[in-house]
Amino acid sequence: MKAIRVYQFGGPEVLKLEDLSDPKPAAGQVVVRTRAIGINPVETYVREGKYGPKQFPYTPGTDAAGIIEAVGANVTRFKPGMRVYTSGALSGAYAELALCSEDQVHPLPDGISFEQGAALGVPYATAYYGLFLRAKPLAGETILVHGASGSVGSAAVQFAVAFGLTVFGTAGTDEGRKVVREQGADHFLDHHAPDYLKQIMDLTGQAGVNIVLEMAAHQNLGKVLGVLAKEGRVVVIGSRGPVEINPRDIMSRTADIRGMTLMNATPKELKGIHAAIIAGLKNGTLRPIINKSFPLADAGKAHEAVLAHGSHGKIVLTP
């Protein structure tokens, strides 16, 4: 099989396409023939060495969708030929074949493309975890999704709309705001506009929003505290560095700043998260958005695209 291999930390050029032996499943494992592979920003941080030591060489990636190729002993939920998506890969997902444990694989409903399936593992699970398990919303509350056109942000908007929240979504381009509007957000704002936070306060009658899902805390955390309602919650989903805040903004509102990382979700939580994702795909409330598709050999270009300014939807590789 062909797979991307990384032998050292560095830029996109360290992603090398190589021929490897096909993986064989042991007990409790399956092999997925990938038809689409999801690119996540965290994979660029790992490649650069920002997330600590790594055993080389390795194949990046956790998210893919495709067909079960083979199953090991004691696998009961899957058979060869079944359509699935992955939320982890023992051998890495940037490859024609991915070796996974049985609990890293989930049925892909009919009518959902492989490209859409590759957009589920990290983005939709992160959005669900941040919204429902960390923010703990009540139907009828207001929510600001900061960076709502990206893969996590658009997933969060879809979940929030289905749950009955009033949704404010921001994006930095006209195309991005079109995406936010199409996902059902009640208000879609330009987070580059100097007065967009004032617009939020005006639209809420100066009450502020109950929840903020923050994708870029290094830029925005100090600002969004000022648009929180009393007892509001900010969930930090993404940050690329430190930020300065005024603690009085939290004190005066009896507000919470809540961190999260999907890696801390328990097996029980993950089981529930993926049950909810599959249900949403079946009933049509969840609709993964695909932006661009690259061949496997162009994984480096895909890594550049996922971090590009104004990127919206999901970047995928197609083996």
Image: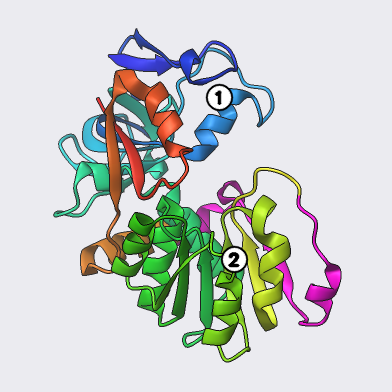
CA–CA distance in space, label 1 to label 2: 35 Å
In this rendering, position of residue 111 left or right of residue 153:
left
Q: Is residue 77 among what the camera can see?
A: no
Give the magenta-colored segment's residue range: 243-272
Mark 1 and mark 2 in contact? Answer it, CB < 8 Å: no
Tag shown at residue 122: none
**Element assignment for label 2:** loop
Looking at the picture, tell me which residue is in the foreground, 88 or 15: 15
Looking at the picture, tell me which residue is in the foreground, 20 or 314: 314
Residue located farthest toward the front when viewing the structure as drawn: 194
Tag shown at residue 47: 1
Q: Quadrant of residue 87?
A: top left
Q: Is residue 268 above or below residue 45?
A: below
- Residue drawn at (47%, 74%) of the image: 168
Q: Is residue 145 among what the camera can see?
A: yes
Q: Which residue is mark 2?
A: 194
Indicate the position of residue 118 as horizontal and vertical percent values: 31, 42
In this rendering, position of residue 245 left or right of residue 48:
right
The kind of residue on which mark 2 rests is: Pro
Q: Is residue 158 magenta?
A: no
**Quadrant, the N terminus:** top left
Indicate the position of residue 251 as horizontal and vertical percent values: 83, 78
